[in-house]
Image (cartoon, grey):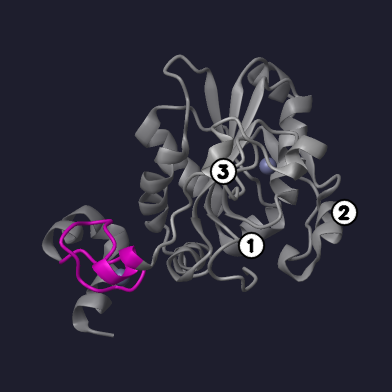
Amino acid sequence: MTWIARIRSVAKPLLGPVLDYALPPRCPACGDIVSESGAFCGPCWQSIDYIGDPLCKVCGVTLPSQAMGDEAQCGACLADPPPFERARALMHYGEVGRTLARKLKYGRRVSLARVMAAQMQRLLALPGDADAILVPVPLHRWRIWSRGFNQAALIGRQLSRATGLPLETGLLRRTKNTPPLHSLGLRSRAKAVRGAFALAPEARARLAGKTAILIDDIWTTGSTASACARMLKGGGAARVEIICWTRVGEAGDRSPPD
Ligand SMILES: [Zn+2]
Ligand SMILES: [Zn+2]
């Protein structure tokens, strides 16, 4: 560790803004010096596989052809409509997507939530008058005790600061501590999250007629997001949108997340 890195790690919690000014900003993925705080270095930026059109209007999966237009849906959504209106993720699950998600979650680099939220903001497609609330996918309280925070809530807080949309961290609760889902197949995942979520007693009053924007770091099969969306709809939300930092299972890296 260089002396600068050592000073950063020790002093940053106390002197964050001052050190951000005094020390050169670094690429949030690889740590190389960059010109602007929160920006990726050239090679990391180039390596990011951002998710773009053509996408299924509902679940956001990549579609084979642009010719189908903005209203096109994938076969799975047509056959079995999901319990949400729109799901989008920023990038395919590659090196940068994985590194930031892991550093935030396991490396306790909570400042990365701001970098991720700044980029995820573009996934929101809300009209100016939308009555929307931000709802992070909850963690079971045992996980929060062991980790100290919920990474989706940290991203949500930054999104709330940037957009002015209210953040609702208490509406949706995780009542079942599910096993790590990356070891399970699609069916087992759906089964593992069944009954894993519940609404707070005051949720109905707060959800009625609202657009609930569910926030998560990694989309794998959509089982967790669907289970949450079902609860929010059951609680009276008019519309549920989901935004995620990265999405596994299409182009790019296919190794399972953890
Ligand atoms: Zn970099
Ligand atoms: Zn779809």
Q: Amino acid at mark 1?
A: Gly
Q: Which residue is mark 2?
A: 191
- Does residue 98 appear to the left or right of 8 in the view shown? right
Dot 3 surroundings within 10 Å: few (below 14), some, or many (20 or more)?
Answer: many
Most extreme residue toward the front, as rendered? Answer: 67
Assess whether mark 1 and mark 2 are in contact (beta carbons under 8 angstroms): no
Quadrant housing the C terminus:
bottom right
Residue 44 in magenta stretch: yes
Q: Look at the numbered disc 3 and give the secondary structure of its residue.
A: loop
Report the image quarter containing ligand 2: top right
Q: Which residue is mark 3?
A: 55
| Label located before the other in sequence (2 or 3) | 3
Q: Amino acid at mark 3?
A: Leu
Closer to the observer: label 1 or label 3?
3
Magenta span main SS:
loop
- Position of residue 62 measured from the top left corner of the image (x, y, whole percent): 58, 50
Q: CA distance from mark 2 to mark 3?
A: 27 Å
Closer to the observer: label 2 or label 3?
3
Q: Which mark is residue 226?
A: none
- Does residue 35 appear to the left or right of 144 in the view shown? left
Quadrant housing the N terminus:
bottom left
Assess whether mark 3 and mark 2 are in contact (beta carbons under 8 angstroms): no
Question: Relative to 211, does residue 245 appear above or below in the rendering?
Answer: below
Query: Which residue appears at 75% of the width and 50% of the height?
Result: 223
Q: Which residue is mark 1?
A: 249
Q: Amino acid at mark 2?
A: Lys
Q: Quadrant of residue 200?
A: top right
Residue 169 in sight here: no
Residues in magenta, as a range: 24-46
- Position of residue 117 measured from the top left corner of the image (x, y, whole percent): 41, 46
